[in-house]
Structures are given as C-alpha cells and as structure tokens.
Image (cartoon, coloured by chain):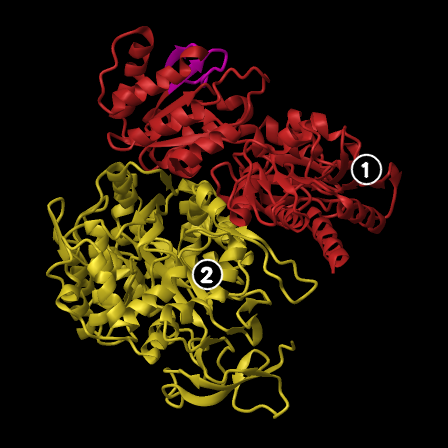
Chain colours: A yellow, B red
Amino acid sequence: MSKARLRVAGGAVYDPANEAGADGAIRDVCIEDGRIVAELPRDAPKVDARGMVVMPGGVDIHSHIAGSSVNHGRRLLPEEHAADPAPAPPLADPDAIPRSGTGGTIPTTFTTGYRYAGLGYTTAMEAAVAPLAARHAHAELDDTPIIDAGLFALLGNDDYLLRQIAAGEVARARDYAAWVLSAAGAYAIKIVNPGGVERWKAGGRNVTGLDDAVGTGAVTPRRILETLADAANALELPHPVHIHCNNLGQAGNAATTLETMRALAGRRAHFTHLQFHSYGGERGKSWKSAAKEVIEHVNAHPEVSADVGQVMFGPATTLTADAPVEYLLHASSGKRWVNVDIELETGCGIVPYSYREKAAVAALQWAIGLELFLLAKDPWRVVLSTDHPNGGSFLSYPELIRLLMDRGYRDERLKQVNQKLVAGSTLADGLAREYTLSEIAIVTRAAPARLLGLKDKGHLGVGADADVTIYANDPDRAKMFSTPRHVIKGGVLVVEEGQLRRAPTGRRLRVRPGYDPAVTRDLKRWFDGYACVSFENYPAVELGE
Amino acid sequence: MTKRVVEHATCLGCGCACDDIAVVVDGDRIAEARNTCALGRAWFADGSVPRETRSGGKVVAPDVALADAAKLLGRAERPLVYLAPEISCETQRAAVAIADRLGALLDSPTGAIAAGILASQRRGRAAATLGEIRQRADLVVFWGVDPADRYPRYASRYAVDPPGLQAPDGRNSRRVVAVDVGPSRGAADADERVAIAPEDEIDALALMRAVVLGRGIGDGTVARVATGLATQMMRARYVALVHDAEPSPRGPPLPLHPDSGEALIALAQALNGPARCALSSLRAGGNRSGADAVATWQTGFPFAVDFAPGYPCYRPHAGAAVLLARGEIDIALLVGSPAGVPQDVAATLGQVTTIAIGPRASAAPFRPKVAIDTGVAGIHEGGTAFRMDDLALPLRPALSGPSVAADVVRALAARLTKGRS
C-alpha cells in the first residue's frame, strides 16, 4: 500500500474541531503524503468506509508508557506479563521485524505501540519523566512503534528550581524550566505534589496544604505552582503546566484542589486525573464525593482544563512520582512496593492494585469520575483519561466510552457496586446525560489535541496529520471503540480490516523554548556542587545551540 | 602526533559508571584515563582490541562471517541469545530482536543473581539513585561489602565522602557502620564494626526487621547485635543500606546467603516509617544493568526469557546455565565480551556451536564457530549504558574500534529476516 494517497470514502465523519466537519456528515477524507488534503484524483486508492464512523486518531493527554518508573513497574509484574502474552503481529512488510511482547497493566514497549494503534489511538503523552531519566524514556519510546509521543518533564520538587524560588529569582526559574525542557527533549512541564515529594525525601512529612514550608518559608506549594505556571505561559508553551495537585487520594482533598485552582486564577493550567483530587469527607474519618464542587469551579473558569483519571474496575498499577502516596498505600495494603528516590529531582513509587466494585472506596472513586464527566459543561476542557495504568489500562477506554454514552448500561453497573459511599452522590441521584459520538470525538481526540497545542492533530481539516480511525457503527459502543475497522497513522494504513498490518516509526513531540544562556553558567556551578552526573552528560537530546 | 582529550567519558569498569573521566588519546592508543580508579584504569587500558573476523577458524570478510552466522542460526533448533557485558543498550535492543525472531532463549549475566531479582519481584524495593544517597544519607551501613574492592569510587562519589544537601560536611556528617558477614568484610573506613556469622545472617536481618516493626525479640547474642543495629537505623534520618548484588569474587560456596537479598529488601522497606531508607544494591559494570532494563521493556522480564512459544516467557529457573548444562541448546549467539560471561555459562559454551559478536570475541576460550570482533561500548562505541541504579548515561567513545557491535547485530538481524521472507 503506497503511503502517498488514500481516500477514506463514504464514512460518517465526526470532526468537531472543524466547522465543516459536521456531526456525522457523509463525506470522503482525502490523504496525500501523510496529510489531509482537499481533493484526490478519482483513481486514488480507497478505503471503503460506507456505514462506518470516521474520526481523527485518538490522542491520549496523560498516560504512563515509557521510562524508568514505568520499567520498574514492568519488572515488578512478571505474573501479569505471563498471563497476557502478545505474539508478534503478522505485518504486511516482509522486511519489518514484528515484535512479540507481553501485556498486563504495563505492556512492553512494542506491545504498547501496537495496542494503542489497535485501539485507534495515534498519539500519546508519557506524563511523568524525571529530566535526569529522560534518556531512558526516549530509548523506550524509540521501541514504541506507530504512535507519536511526547513526554512531560517533572518539575516542582527539584533542588535547583526550589533554590531559585527561595532566592526570588523568577526569571532564572523560567530560564531553567526552558533549559530543562530542551535538555530532556520534553513537551510540557509536569508538576507532581509540589514540594511534597521533596519534603518526604528529606525525611519529613508530606505537605498538607498550599502554604506549608518546603525547606524554607519562602518556598511553598503555592509559590512553586505560581512560578511554573507563569513560566509555562511566559514561554508560550503549547501546553500549560500539567498539575497533579497535593494530597492525591486523600479524603477531603477537594479543598486543596479548589485552593490550587484559585491560587492560579487567571492563568492557563491543566489539572490532571481530577478524579483522584475530588474527594470530600475528612482524612482518616469519612469519604464522600466532592465532584460537583470541583467540576462547577472548572465549568466557571475557562482558563482551567482537566483530564478525569477515571477508575475502572479490575487490575491497575499505581505508579507515580508522588512517592509519599505510594508509601501510604503500601503501608495500608501490605502490597508489594517499589520506591526509588531520584537524585535532586523527584521520587518514584509503585504499588500494584485492583479496584473492586464491591469495595466502598473504589466504588466511590468510579462514581466520582463519572460525575466529573457527566457534570462537565465543556467537553473541550474536560477530557478522557484513566491515568493509565493508575486508574486502569488504556484498554479500558472503550468500556468507559460505553458508560458515558449508554445511560441504561451505566445505571445497571451502578446497581452492582458497593453503595455505602456512593449513596448521596449526584450519580446515585440520577444523571441522565449520554455523551454523543461527537462529544466522544471531542474528549478522546479533538480536545486533548487542542489542550496540548497540537495544531495538526485531533482534526481532519486540510493540512492536518493523516491520523484517522474508522469504526464499524456498532450500537455496543464498547465493542465499537475496542476494535476499529481501520486505523491510518501519518497516511499509512496501520490497521486494515481489524488487523494490525503496518508499524511505522512514530514521531517524537518536543518543544525548544528559548532561554537566557546565562542560566547554564549558574547551572554548571550547581552541577559541580551537587550533581552526580556531569552537566555535559545530562541532556537526553542534542540541545542544538 | 598531538594528543587529544575526550572529556566527560563514562567508565563502565564497574556499575558506578563514573562519567567524569578525561580520556587522553595519543594516536590510536589511550595514553591516560584521568579521574579513574585502579579498576577504571585497567578497564580503559590502552584501548587496544583485536580486530578479527573469523569463521570456521579462518579469517574471513565480515560479509562471509555474517552469512555463515545467519546460516547457522537459521538451522538452529534451540538457540540461545546471550547478552554478555561491554555492549551498549542499542546493541542489546538489536540482540533481543534477534532472540524474538528466532524464538530463542534470551539470557544475561543477571541469571547469576536470580535470587535477588526474584526477591525484588516478590517484595518490590526501597531504593534511591546513587546521587540521592549522597544528598540524604546520615547513616551508611555496609552489609558484608567493602566498596573499595570492586566499586572503588562508590565511597568518594556517592555514599560516604562527598557533601550533600543534608550532609553538608561530607564524611563528618555521616555515621558509617561496617557489618562483617563472616569473611565478607564491611567498609574499612567505619565508625563502628559489627561481626555476624554467615549462618546467622538471615536471622539477624529478620530480627532487625522485627525490632523496626516494634516486636519483642528476646536477648540472645544475635538478637543483641540486631537490636543495636536496628536501633541506630531507626534513629537515623536517612539510612543507606549497601550490599553487593553480584556473586562473590571468592566463588562458591557463597559466603553470603542467597536469600539475604530478600531479607535486606524487607528490612529497608520496614525502615521507611520510623526513618527513610534506601537499599543500594551494588552491580558490576559493562552495562549489565542495561541488559536487565532492555529485556524488561522489550519482553516484560529482566532475564531468562524464552521466546520459543512465539512470545516471551519467564524461565528464571531454566535460564542459559541450566539449559546448556542439560544439553538442550544447540547454537548460542553471544553478543558482548566473552570474558564477562559467568563461569557456569562459559564452561558449557564450548560444548555447543557458538557465534560470538563483541569485544575480543576472537579470543573467546570456547572457540566460537563464527567470531566477529567489535569495539568496547564506552571506549570505541557510543550509545547508552545504565549505571547500577538504573540511570541511563551517554557513552563517549575515545577511539574508533573494529566493527560497531550494534551495526553488526542489526546486519545479522536483517539477514535473518530476509531468510524468512
């Protein structure tokens, strides 16, 4: 199959980012040299999409698929891998080397690429990489075929940044953030539990609020958030700061989440896996949903965006730079636990986990995620994620889509879960909303692409990347979204008649913001004083200076 | 000829992977490797390596050797692909692809420390990158290991001497305890020395954990020692518990109990609560840790991966050493330095047909049928290698070598693919 031209003919096209791409209008999508074009000659090769649904390729705004923490997780799960073998797919190109692998909640790299593509996703963001370990993450992404991928660089518990904040050096903090993004080959700034990881690594307690001192009173979670949010906006990064708030997973943490949103009022900011930060009640005493309060704030503030981080029943692996949270989970569950303190930058904690529908807190978490989805007013600002593999595997997205689109199914499922904490939530009171196909196209591709600032993705306008997914229009939406009929990535037909047939190499998405080179002289002095890696060996990619 | 200097080179002489080496090159030889320890100096040496390509004992052109290797592997019924040391992650990745294509057993020297890896899969780990130990540790406990022997710059770069964020006066900010387990002595430079008989090691670690968890443990001799050690660890802010994950240099019988790894993990995890604690597991060099990382991200398992069913299966108790000894392997593709292959595997490689691609392959004692000499990763070849704590570092080659290992392995993979289609 030539890469050059392809006509996706006669499908119902859902392209909500473009005015012309009306709701399911029947039309052709034309592809030439990896891009969407307006017209093609009549004799161009065709994919018959009659009776099918055509959407842009899926875009995952937040996932954990590559790098040192992910690989620590893989190593911890031999039994999951043994239970989910993934033989090499029969690729069409005789010179390609198709690769076998294993799955489970953290699949191997090749299997990750194949499975994302098999799900109709063509872009994914690795959401937490210590800049020091970025070289490792890039090496894994090099072995992750098909999908275009970027990585988010962890900042906010790193010694150099905290020093600049302590000294009031706002401009230098911004230059440093720009340098780190460039050196790590990263796409965006990720903040995880600002200040809390550093405090825990230093032998103290995790922070509990935005004004706790981190080392010195001049450094607080609030100052870290403000500094990095302002840096991202001043640097005009395509994606604003991507924030994992303080107090993840704690009863009553919605207050912290709302306070964080208010602290950054007026600034663009993305709040990730919002479900894990929308709990009411009181720490150590009681749990309840605070989804309504949190989502109403999001609804009223157009500068705020979020992904949900839905919990799905079944196996998961909790894996985060928020190491103190994983310590608590290990201490309370007695489960296997990996902790790796990462020098001068961040932490890493991993605990395998399972969300059981008969467990009260898991049922509440599940309900809160659905409440956030169903009460969100603007699908362009509240998008789909499970924080793979934390809330569940990316393979559970089709089931999640069914829960959003099919009220009857959702209500049936709701009856089966533990009712103890769910009672009294807006979900239990009855939420009638059903997502439309157009809204699903928004929350799974158009909106994540827009929030990421990926101008050529998430839509099918002329000039866009030719990433296209074609689904059989099955009334069982879980079935429909789990097995796309055809998937086109960069103009290449990777899934054909439901079979993975081609596995081209994906692109790396990264930013190269400018910075005052004076910061590198100061950084070099700091490296000489504290670091255990040479300044010259730190960048994972060529800086291109 | 003028000398040139390659700065910030990474030494793979041991798992410390010191990346501050200045390699002075005079002509086509290394004249000096500055900042190295004795082990690093021996590793860099003058950088000379053999540059032969042999098949059936004769010197042949590289293409001929590759064709012969592809033919042998194409006929293999139960092939082994072995990731020996001194190759980059790029070469390891290409070699795992061949194992996948052939349906081979994949293994590496990590098979020799299987007990410790399996323990970390049952329990997890409480760990830190080496630089974090430098920043935080106020108590360093060397459990039956003196890093001066096999990890000479560990103490000066990481765990004991250098100043850190929470150890501003370096060595003076830290207390060092050496635990001698029989003949395996703790660090010489210690503030306190404690002796434990090898037969008491597991009990002592279990009792220490019991103390940390607040359980009463009686007052026998071992209990008294355990109480003393555990109490100081609980009082510390951040404990670095250091042990040697590699097989003993003294050879079998091992003076360290094979299950000590699991007991150390459990103790380190329990200490997070009353204090912070990281277990630092010392690993040898040559990018051994990279082989684990690559195997894990490509197969889901760190070593002993059998591709025979058409997908990766974990066979931690039936790895290379076992299958070779049973006579199940007919052809072995060894990628890396034959000199770095553990004794139990090396001893049996001579009994099967072998293809060796790597540094000094032509000098392998097991007489490979096909041998292709390559450079040493980090001396002649660039790419990526892992420090013992799983941190990926760049390699800065000082010399150009014979064939580049990654290129040779990829060329072999291409021949195998064409052979199939």
Secondary structure type for disc 1: loop
Which residue is more in the foreground, A517 or A416? A416
Point out residue B53 in the picture as x, y percentages from the top left corner: 82, 42
Residue A38 visible from this viewpoint: yes
Q: Is residue A153 left or right of residue B71?
A: left
**Disc 1: which chain?**
B
Q: Is residue A27 left or right of residue B111?
A: left
**Residue furthest toward the top?**
B221
User: Which mark is nearer the camera, 2 or 1?
Assistant: 1
Cβ–Cβ under 8 Å for marks 2 and 1: no
Q: Residue at x 37, y 82 (%)?
A: A17
> Type of residue at label 2?
Ser
**Residue that label 1 marks:** B369
Question: Any magenta on residue A447?
Answer: no
Which residue is more in the foreground, A464 or A104? A104
Q: Residue at x 45, y 42 (%)?
A: A79
Point out residue A519 in the picture as x, y percentages from the top left corner: 40, 57
- Which residue range is magenta in the image? B177-197
Question: Any magenta on residue B180?
Answer: yes
Quadrant of the rendering where the N terminus of chain B is positioned: top right
Q: CA distance from mark 2 to mark 1?
A: 47 Å
**Disc 2: which chain?**
A
Quadrant of the rendering where the C terminus of chain B is positioned: bottom right
Which residue is more in the foreground, A122 or A212? A122
**Residue that label 2 marks:** A182
Q: Is residue A352 above or below residue B134?
A: below
Q: Mark 2 Cα within 10 Å, few/some/many (few <14, many 20+)?
A: many
Q: Is residue A62 above or below residue A105?
A: below
Q: Residue at x 63, y 40 (%)?
A: B105
Residue B19 visible from this viewpoint: no
Q: Quadrant of residue A341?
A: top left
Q: Quadrant of residue A292?
A: bottom left
